[in-house]
Amino acid sequence: MTADGYFGRFGGFYVPEVLVFALKELQAGYRRFSQDSDFKDDLHNLLCTYAGRPTPLYFAKRLTDVVGGASIYLKREDLAHTGSHKINNALGQALLAKRMGKSRVIAETGAGQHGVATATACALLGLDCEVYMGETDVERQKLNCYRMNLLGAKVNVVRSGSRTLKDSINEAMRDYASTSDHTHYLIGSVVGPHPYPTMVRDFQSVIGAEAKEQTLAQTGRLPDALVACVGGGSNSIGLFHPFAEDKEVQMFGAEAAGEGIETGRHSASVVAGREGVLHGSRTLILQDDDGQISETASVAAGLDYPAVGPEHAFLSGIGRAKYSAVTDREAVSAFHQLSEAEGIIPALESAHAMHLATIVARDLGSEKALVVCLSGRGDKDVDQIARLEGML
Amino acid sequence: MSLIGATFGALKSSGEGAYIPYVCCGDRGTEFTVKLVRTLAKAGADIVELGLPFSDPLADGPTIQAAMVRALSSGFTTQSLFDTISRIRDDGIGKPIVVMTYYNPVVRMGVDAFCEKLSKVGGDAVLTVDLPIEESRQLDDAAGDNGLDVIRLVAPTTSDARAREIMGQATGFVYAVSISGVTGAKDTLPDTAVSLLGRLSRISSVPVALGFGISNQGQVRDAISAGASGVVEGSALINMYSQSSQDEESVLDLIEKHSRGIKSATRFISDEETQKERL
Ligand SMILES: Cc1ncc(COP(=O)(O)O)c(C=O)c1O
């Protein structure tokens, strides 16, 4: 990392003047509390006693046998409270908001997992919560909408733009511009202006830190490769970051190829994006020749975003991590494969990582081992898959 | 001195504030944009802010968002902006033009290429909403090389120290945002605007134009007497044509009448001073 908030030339602080004060306050707040042992103890305690950490590292023997290659280990974020890795960041930021004296929290959500995690953290800490969710996403993730209501949060349906995740971020930023004196904007991935990409990475790094200890304990050495899906890029950076200095550990990110890169209906911003500025960061973005942001597509609502966290743009640029795109069809087939081979129904987002993991496992060969971040459980997607396959 | 600097200088000596209408370029087609700018110039606009639409305008409220969506879905491109400015200049309208946009369309084209082109077609300044001073080096250099001003924003939450820094780097004028929030027409001037204008006038003598929420003459008089050197009106103008079912000619007539009123309210300084003299 170069200057504060930069990863090489990516990242930064591209925000309207109305947001500068609030974001500088957040930078200072985060700097202070990330070094405060009381804060760290409180968060650690919540993660262990409330959110179910550490999550297991599981050797998927049957899947490994079916695939035929490196041993596949699953980092079971699906077993964390609320069913995905999103809770790690939600608890961290909600606790920070509380320490900073904020009484209200807002969030954007795509799949609804981050919205549910935020609503949960706010219920736990007694904070008011409002979640922005695109109309398109509300339709495909109805159950998560209702879960947020059960948790006492208000869901604001976003009808502007493409009515998906990027538009929910726009709406949340507009809200934040007029409410930041008492409101914290709890961004759900490693995107946005400084300090978010750094702060969210730090809160998610618990994934990789645990995985490192667990692989060492179970296999006596570091894994040969790490695999994770990349929407904004928080579960992947959380897994990758603690291995940053372990040069022998390869990193692979699975983006959403949707209906196929060539169709233009996808969300693969590292694979097919170009440099630009969106939502506060300089990063890789799916956009047209005039710099207008493209509409994206993916069977997985949580990957349906036209940009990527700036640190991924950096890691890709220096070749430290490799990114490839997985189609809807491949992800759905991996969804079935894991369900049948291991009795684990993955989130559709995580199914993208599972598909890429089978390819990496074969490339590595049988003496090697890889860790896949199973970022969430698939209950939220069962209804969608059943409909897709004509079962409902 | 830039044309914008000279414009504020002349207005100051005649005891007026600047009337700066915002026009979303390409909304209702570029033909309409040219007609609208002509109408506004006739009504007394001193500077024109021409919006280059962006797909994700996170500092804008529903009115300008909708205008941008309309423009983009009718096939508007960055080239259309330059063509429109050329046509405005060909029409003999010489008022300073500030292009207001978000940073990504500028980055996509190339910051240098964008400034060079804008200068060539007759633009005077650029304002990128999501580019705070921390990140604006590249644009400042490119704009400077091409003789363009960079218009910067200050907000009610901007501290005095930061405002001093922003105003110290100002070229042309500084755009003061009246509220902590997004664009959109309002009926009265919020207290935050009055106190911001007061603070800014104590910090620097750089001209300050107040925008966000301006829609009527009362607000304009309040802004001018609180220290503004000009006002920006955007959403209210867009509402006048987008919510009207009348034909284009009558709508433009109504806008002309309205804008003459706003312009006359900027002459409040001189009125006030003449009245004082009479007393
Ligand atoms: C289960 C799951 N995995 C992954 C993601 C993608 O986000 P990120 O790339 O930030 O991990 C989401 C987002 O909603 C998700 O719900």
Image (spheres, grey):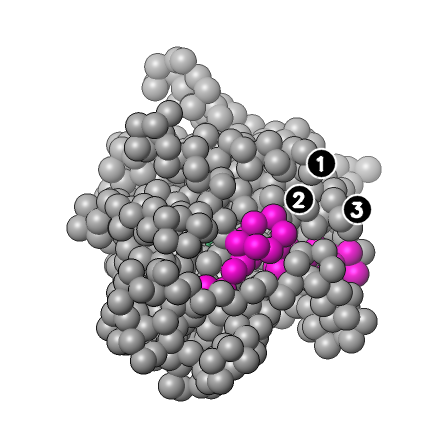
Q: Counting residues from the N terminus, which is met first, the one under dot 3 or under dot 2? A: 2
Q: Counting residues from the N terminus, which is met first, the one under dot 1 or under dot 2? A: 2
Q: Quick one: B266 or A382, which is closer to the camera?
A: A382
Residue A222, given in percent of the width and then of the height, sits at 45, 82
Residue that carries the numbered disc 1 in the rendered image: A152
| Any part of residue B97 in sight | no
- Dots 1, 2 in contact, CB < 8 A: yes
Return the chain for callout 2.
A
Judge from the rendering whether residue A103 lies leftward or rightward of residue A340; answer left or right. Answer: right
Relative to A238, residue B90 above or below: above
Residue that carries the numbered disc 2 in the rendered image: A119
Magenta stretch bounds? A74-100
Inter-mark Cα distance, 1 to 2:
7 Å
> Is residue A138 a member of the stretch shown in magenta?
no
Q: What's the residue at 38%, 86% (across, down)? A: A248
Judge from the rendering whether residue A149 lies leftward or rightward of residue A281; answer left or right. Answer: right
Return the chain for callout 1.
A
Same chain? Circles 1 and 2: yes
Which quadrant is home to the N terminus of chain B?
bottom left
Q: Amino acid at mark 1?
A: Gly
Mark 3 crowdedness (10 Å alpha carbons): few <14, some 14-19, many ≥20: few
Q: What's the residue at 50%, 52% (across, down)? A: A376
Q: Amino acid at mark 3?
A: Gly
Which quadrant is home to the C terminus of chain B?
top right
Q: Quick one: A34 or A65, which is closer to the camera?
A: A65
Element under disc 3: loop
Element under disc 2: helix
> Is residue A88 a member of the stretch shown in magenta?
yes
- Dots 3, 2 in contact, CB < 8 A: no
Same chain? Circles 1 and 3: yes
Name the image quarter holding residue A49: bottom right
Q: What's the residue at 19%, 46% (across, down)? A: A263
